[in-house]
Image (cartoon, rainbow, N blue to C red):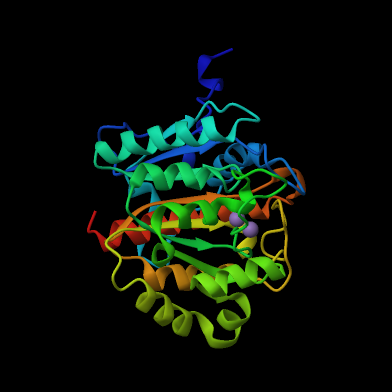
Amino acid sequence: MSRSFYVDDLSKHFGGFKREYSESDFVLFGVPFDSTSSFRPGSRFGPAAIREASANIETWSWRTGMDFEEIKLHDLGDLAVVHGDAAETIRRVREAVEDIILSKKIPVMLGGEHIITLGALRGVRDTTVVSFDAHFDMRDDYLSNKLSHACVMRRALDELGVKNVVIVGTRASYRDEIEFVKKSGVNYISSQRILNGGAKEAGAWLKEVLADSKKIYISVDMDVLDPAFAPGVGNPEPEGVPTSTLLDLIEEVVDERIVGFDVVEVSPAYDSGVTAVTASKIVYELCCMVAKSIGL
Ligand code: MN
Ligand code: MN
């Protein structure tokens, strides 16, 4: 049989193509870690599912008028994680992101559960984080664990200060957390307000909140979307925003200050496939929006 019947498995590379690290503007890596998942585990399989989906969707971005195939992105593969050890995994993520930042490239991280974002924030340093999420993730600890996915934005707040943590799409919380968020003055916007006022109004609010930020890191917890649009997540919550509204809102705020982004919490065992496809699409569009805004 001819060797030409054997193909290089491009589904192992995000977007289905390979590009050298040295010629890249974006550097993507996966973090297959889900040890603190409290409801529906399995986001460790998220990066593989998102990559596979990414190699099987079309590349043209109607929003930006760009082709994702022209985006210079290198896929490092997945980080070796230590299951059960969030602190060590966070440390490795921080080092990975520091390396990417040092080589003047933009880190793109695929989760995995949300706690990994803490490592990325430590890697990019002194940034504002915008967390698109149904949840605040502002518990001081969860089940006695301070490094739980449910605490990631509380740890970010500890390290970056209240002005540098913004939560978008909230609709799931409990009394103590709401009281903490209100007392400490965390900037947030609920999914109801986005749905009622639209992406333009929410975008205007977000731009004002971000006016003094020098750097912006975007974290997309896929449960910000309504479960109708993203069923395969660890903690689904009804009354979320549709995919188009999320992308409209992201488009409102992306500018030259974006220093990195992640898409987390895809749990393929609960997915019909649409969550992984949507996660890929969000990465495509974010890369195109960022590339366009900084003139790449
Ligand atoms: Mn989250
Ligand atoms: Mn969430």
> Which residue extends farthest bottom?
197
Q: Nearer the viewer, residue 214 or 106?
A: 214
Quarter of the rendering containing residue 258: bottom left
| x then y, percent, for residue 89 | 53, 32
> Which residue extends farthest top?
1
Q: Nearer the viewer, residue 165 or 144?
A: 144
Q: Is residue 122 left or right of residue 196?
A: left
Name the residue at 39% across, 67% down: 163
Name the residue at 45% across, 36% down: 93
Q: Nearer the viewer, residue 175 or 204?
A: 175
| x then y, percent, for residue 189 | 54, 76
| x then y, percent, for residue 2 | 54, 14
Name the residue at 54% across, 56% down: 154
Q: Is residue 179 left or right of residue 88?
A: right
| x then y, percent, for residue 138 | 59, 59
Q: Is residue 88 above or below residue 39?
A: above
Q: Nearer the viewer, residue 219 or 125?
A: 125
Quarter of the rendering containing residue 182: bottom right
In which quadrant of the rendered image does the N terminus lie? top right
Q: Is residue 212 left or right of residue 153?
A: left
Q: So how many labels did they put on this image?
A: 0
Q: Is residue 122 above or below residue 168?
A: above
Q: Can residue 59 be seen in this snapshot?
A: no
Q: Is residue 215 above or below residue 167?
A: above
